[in-house]
Structures are given as structure tokens and as C-alpha cells.
Image: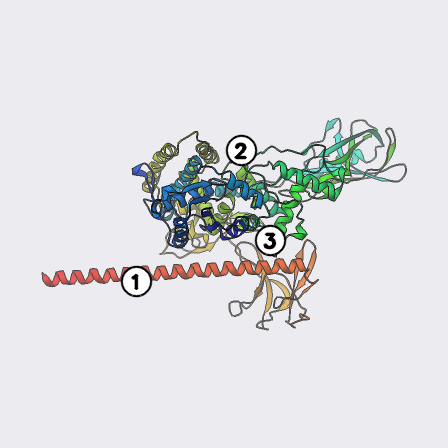
Amino acid sequence: MGKHLVIVESPAKAKTIEKYLGKDYTVLASYGHVRDLPSKNGAVDVDNDFEMNYQVPADSEKQIKAITKVAKESDTIYLATDLDREGEAISWHVLEELKKRVKGFGSRAVKRIAFSEITKSAIQNAVSNPRDLNMTMVDAQQARRALDYLVGFNLSPVLWRKVRGGLSAGRVQSVALRLICERENEIEAFVPEEYWTIDGQFATSEGAKLKGKLWHYQGKKVEKFTFTNEAQATAAVQHLQPQTYTVKSIEQKKVQRRPAAPFITSTLQQDASRKLGFAARRTMQAAQRLYEAGHITYMRTDAVNLANEAIAATREMIQSSFGADYVPAKPVFYKGKSKNAQEAHEAIRPTNPGLHPRDLPVSDADQKRLYDLIWKRTIACQMANAIMDQTAITLQGDGSDSAFRASGSVLRFDGFLRVYREGRDDSNIQSDEEDNLLPDVKEGEQVTVAQVDSDQHFTEPPPRYSEASLVKALEEHGIGRPSTYASIIGTLQDRGYVRIEQRRFFPEDVGRVVNKFLTEHFAQYVDVGFTAKLEDELDAIARGEEKWKPMLRKFWEPFTKLVVEKTESVRKRDVTTEETGEKCPKCDEGDVVIRLGRYGRFKSCNRYPDCDYAAPINADGTEVVKEEPKSTGVTCPQCNNAEIGEKKSRRGKVFYSCNDYPKCKYAIWDPPLKEACPECEWPIITLKSKKSGDVKKCPSCEWQDPPMTEAEKKRSLAAKERFAKMREAKAAKAKAAKAKKASVKKKTAAKKTTAKKATTRKKTAA
């Protein structure tokens, strides 16, 4: 038997696959893409039919040399990268480099193998059933990369000139930013409306309590805005209170609740955000490691189907663990809701349903928690429906023009709910009706009015996007694909366009200015419909229905004309400066304008630098009023001089710091208590409020009351390690940027010196 080389993307994946193949197989990792477009103009040659000038980055040269060395001695090359478009493109890039570097490469057999799970049977089956590279998928990925490059490298410089340096625009990220900014505009423009609800408390002849909502009033059905002020609500209560009420009707019906479909990429990110508090990037990192270790199927997918073998194994597991009542008569199949499902992948599931989360052989806390979520969702999707009894009791007043309605549902058979309950976007609170037990009454029975109450409410603005709801919105609009959601969100945060507070997206000032500029001047290219249409075209290319270069040409010609036009016609001050119509309070000559500075928007005089008036502003343009710190009654433990005060950051986040700032810079996030730590004797402790209750913690050591559970300790340690890595990466990036800046400065100085010497020589010669 000859020698075989198997090429995958990651070393972890290589290590797992190597266990399942014989000694004649060598498995090497490419460490992702071995070629990419360089970060410079001309990487996509628009004048030469969109020629893609790929290069091997310096940090990929080591990997491609190692692959080339083994390829020279191999008879067969197996390209075993992921089964989506990006995986297909990685295989193609590796193959193109090998053709250049290996003499006589054409004599070797090249086979493409694909699998959705890293198990022995799946790997061996893939090796036995190879295929050719799918060039339509490669073309679709090339088109996506070219589009992203053309938009980024042509639109970003416009932002540098018209807003400020260091900003970026992206084909998909700019649309996501638009969604966040438009939601913020809706919230700011929202005007609350008052409305009142009326509830009745009743007692049956046996003394049982019964609560109902007013359903009909004076012959009309009660709507949300039937009562819009206190006077109307009070008049209604006075009309309803003295009446005698009778049970007019009792409606009962059985309702079945179906389990949710197994996870696809977007729903996994959404539920991990809701239930585990994971960011999309964190979810995908943990899922990637689980996949590479062979514990779950491929995690970048928008298909909800499961393999027949997986369904059979899952049903068998349900039967043995929960009993026959929990196994439906027939397997449950699901239909995807994704607007443009890509390749025919499987849903995300455990490779072995019999491997319970408690037995998962990994130590990483994130992987354990994510596997638990995936396992439960997969098991639940093949379990029997939950069955509930729903009851509605109508109580009619003696005037026959008004009625209350009491509703409730009782869970009769838990079914899939025994294992898993799907999370909700903006509330984890169950319906008031669920498990609301109603007393036993009969039609015609009279009930006694205990109390009729009215409650005031105000309508609320739409909620800000969470990571879960943003991913859901992108998916519903057909924007982006499974592999891109995490990077889109990450880019918005990395660029400083948005921030996350209480797990919700808030647009930063610079993000809003960038969005305003793009929507006013490049409206078509940040339009939700236009971006979704481009995704449709990329899908058509992947299916072989369209060619990729004509699509790029159709996009590029009007786009580049608009870029040139806006670069020439738009002035920077029109973008970053906003008139207020106010006179300068300092010089009384100039006008107050709102400018965009390094740290956000602020008010200043348009006569600057002749007048130096400046004032920080809130999101709505009003001046920030500096509040005096609220007293906590706790002395600063660092300087033992001033008191710790409650303050607010520029973004409105509450924190506690020494009132002797900047002499003393002691600060903490949680309210301080005048109690010494029983462990390290630090003069104060803090009180942290959690859903599970209040926790006392020492800001100087690890002590807390109640103590952390083992699971909490592991999560805390994992979080610290994660943040330490982030800090190290940030420091390394800053160091590299500083070194690059120093190098550029040195080269510039050398050029100036050379030019100066040349000028001196010319003068001397003259």
C-alpha cells in the first residue's frame, strides 16, 4: 500500500482523525487558509477581469512547507477540510500551492473527502467515498471574499477622510450596525402611551379564590387602550364593583406543545446567549473544540435534519432513560426556516447520544456547558409532545354588559419539557396562564366580588438587540451565513462602533456617525434588502446557476462611481459637525455645534480656536450635568482619608470610587459595606446582587459569602484565563503597533535626511 496524506485545517482535528486511520496515513493541518488576499490595493485586479492575487502569508509558510514535504512522498492526497464553502476554498488553495511547489504533482491522486462528524465510521466512510473539489462552491467563496475586499478597501478610506482615521466599513457589518442604530433611534423617538388594566378578585361558594381580567365592558371587548387615564379606570371600577357575577361558560381543551428543532448555528448562538450568557464568538470557540474532539457534528450549518442512524440512536436512548411514553410513535422531522439554507449538512448534535453530559471527557467548563445544551436539545427534539389542559372561565355581571375572564393551563404530561425548555429572546418569564390552577366551578354558579382593581401601565419601546436577537434578525433578513455571525458581532465591538451593557447592544457615538454617513451617502449598499439579494446571488453561484465574475462586475461599476463622487463632493465638517441653533454661552458670538471627538460627541463653539468652549453631551444631545457623588458612608480603604462615593461613568454605568480622585484612584463596581473581610481583614467588602440572591465579596481576596460552588469556581477560573489571554493579545497588538509606528517614523526621518543631503549637494554644485 502506498503512502497517503490527509490535509485538514486544525491540529486538534488532525490529532483526532489520525487515531482512526492506519499507519500509511499522515494527517497534517493547514492552520486555516494557506493563501489570502494581501492587505493592499490591487489584491483584486478590477482592470484584469477581477484577477485574485493571492499570496501565502509569512505565518502560513511553515505549514505549507511541511505539507509540501510530505506531499512529495505521498501517492494520494486527501483534502479533508470542513464541508462548507470556506472549507472547500481552503482545500482549493492548498491544492493550488502544491501544484506550484511539487514537481510532477499531476501524477498524484487528489481526492476530496467530507464528513459532518469526526468519528471512526464517518472518517472511514468518507475515505471510501471521495469526490472531486466542488468548484462552484469555491467560486462562491471567492466572490464573497472579493466583495468584502472591494467594499472594505474602497469604502474604509472614505471614512478615514470624512469621519476619522482607523475606521472601517464592511459589506455585512455595516448593515448589522444599521440595525442597531435604527433600533436606538426608535427607542429615543418613542413616546410612552398610558393605559390601564382592570382585574377582579372573586371567591367561589366554597371560598376558593379566582382572579380574572376584564374581558368585556359595556358590551364591547376590552382592548389595550380601552382605558387611557385614571378617571376612565376609576369609573369602570365603580361600575363593576357592586355587580353580582355568575359563571357563564367554562371552556376546556387539550393543547400539545411541540419540541424545538435541533440546533443550527444561529439557534445555538441564540440559546447559548440566553441560557449560558455566552457571546457568539465564545460559543463558536467551544463548539469548534467539541467538534474537533469528535463529540458533536459540524457546528457551522443551517440544516435541521438529522441522520437516520442518529435519530434511531436518540430514540433508543430516550426509551432506556425515560420510558416508552416519551418516545413518539414515529420519528420527528423538521423543516428549516432559514431563508437560504446552504449545503446539505446535518443539524448540530452529539455524535453519540448515549454520551451523557456528566460523562463528557473534557475539563473545559465552556465545552461542558455547551455540550449539555446541545445534548438536551437533541434528545428533546425526538421526544413526545408536552400535553396541557387549557381552561377559560367567563364570569358575567348581572348587567350582562360586562364580563371577566380567568385563564389557566395545567401541565398533564411533561414530554420533552422533562429535558429541555427553549429560551426566549426578551423574557424568560413563563406565561401567567401556565400552571395557573383554577378552582372547580360550575356553569350558573354565583361568585362573590372580593375586589376590583385598576393598574396603570405605559407602553414600552422595542428592546435593544441582544446577541441572540441580533443573530436572529440577521438570519431572518437573509444577511450573512452561519460562519459569519460571530465575526460580524466581534468586528462591531472591536471597531468601537457598539458596546454591550447588560447583554444589550448600545451604539457608540462614532458608530452612529458612521451609520448616518453610510445611510445618507451609500444607502443602497447598507440596505437590508440589497445585502440579502447579494447573499441570494452567492447561493446561486454555489449551486452553479450563475458565474461569479459577471456578478462582481455588476456590483463594482456603480459602486466605484459612487465612491469617487462622494469622496469629492462630501465635506468632512458636514459629516462630523451638527448645527444646534444655539449661541455660544462663553463668547456670545459664535454658534454652538456638535462635533465628533476622539471620545465621542461633544458641544463646542464654531469659532474654535478663538473660543475654546466645550461641553460633554448625552446621547440625545443635552449637556451632561455633573452630579455630586452619592454618599456610601464607607471610608476609602486605600487612602483612609476620603469617602467612597457612588458615581456614574460617561456611559451611565454605576461604579464606586474614592472622592479624593485623582490623588486616590481606588474604584470598585459593586456597593461597598463597612465590614472587614474575615479572611484577609481588608477594611471593606462589597455586596453583589445576583438572580440567586445577594453575595458578599471581598475586593482584595477570593472570599465570598455564600461560598462559590465547584461549578462557579471552574467558570470563574476559566473567565480569568480567558481575560488574561485577551489582555496579553491586546498588549502584544499594541506593542507591534508601537514598533511599526517607530519603524515608519525612522524610515521617514531617514528619507528626509537623504532628501536634505541631496538638496545641499545640488546647492553646492550650483
Residue 527, position in %: x, y?
46, 36
What label sits on residue 746 in the rendered view?
A: 1
Q: In the rendered structure, which amino acid carries the disc numbered 2?
A: Lys
Label 2 belongs to which residue?
339
Q: Nearer the viewer, mark 1 or mark 3?
A: 3
**SS under mark 1:** helix
Residue 460, position in %: x, y?
62, 41
Q: Is residue 440 left or right of residue 53?
A: right
Q: Residue 158's image quarter? A: top left
Q: Compared with residue 124, is residue 529 higher up or lower down, i.e. above or below?
A: above
Q: In the rendered structure, which amino acid carries the disc numbered 1?
A: Lys
- Seen from this angle, which residue lies furthest left? 766
Mark 3 or mark 2: which comes first in sequence? 2
What label sits on residue 194 in the rendered view?
A: none
Marker count (numbered): 3
Mark 2 or mark 1: which comes first in sequence? 2
Residue 45 visible in the picture: yes
Q: Around disc 2, counting alpha carbons within 10 Å, would you say few (fewer than 14), some (14 to 19), or many (20 or more)?
A: some
What label sits on residue 366 in the rendered view?
A: 3
Q: In the rendered structure, which amino acid carries the disc numbered 3?
A: Asp
- What colouring style does the render use? rainbow
The reply to whether callout 3 and callout 2 are in contact (CB within 8 Å) is no
Q: Nearer the viewer, residue 117 or 667?
A: 117
Q: Nearer the viewer, residue 353 or 477?
A: 353
The reply to whether callout 1 and callout 3 are in contact (CB within 8 Å) is no
**SS under mark 3:** helix
Residue 470 visible in the picture: no
The span from disc 2 to disc 1 (Cα, nearest Å) is 53 Å
Q: Nearer the viewer, mark 3 or mark 2?
A: 3
Mark 1 or mark 3: which comes first in sequence? 3
Q: Residue 378's image quarter? A: top right
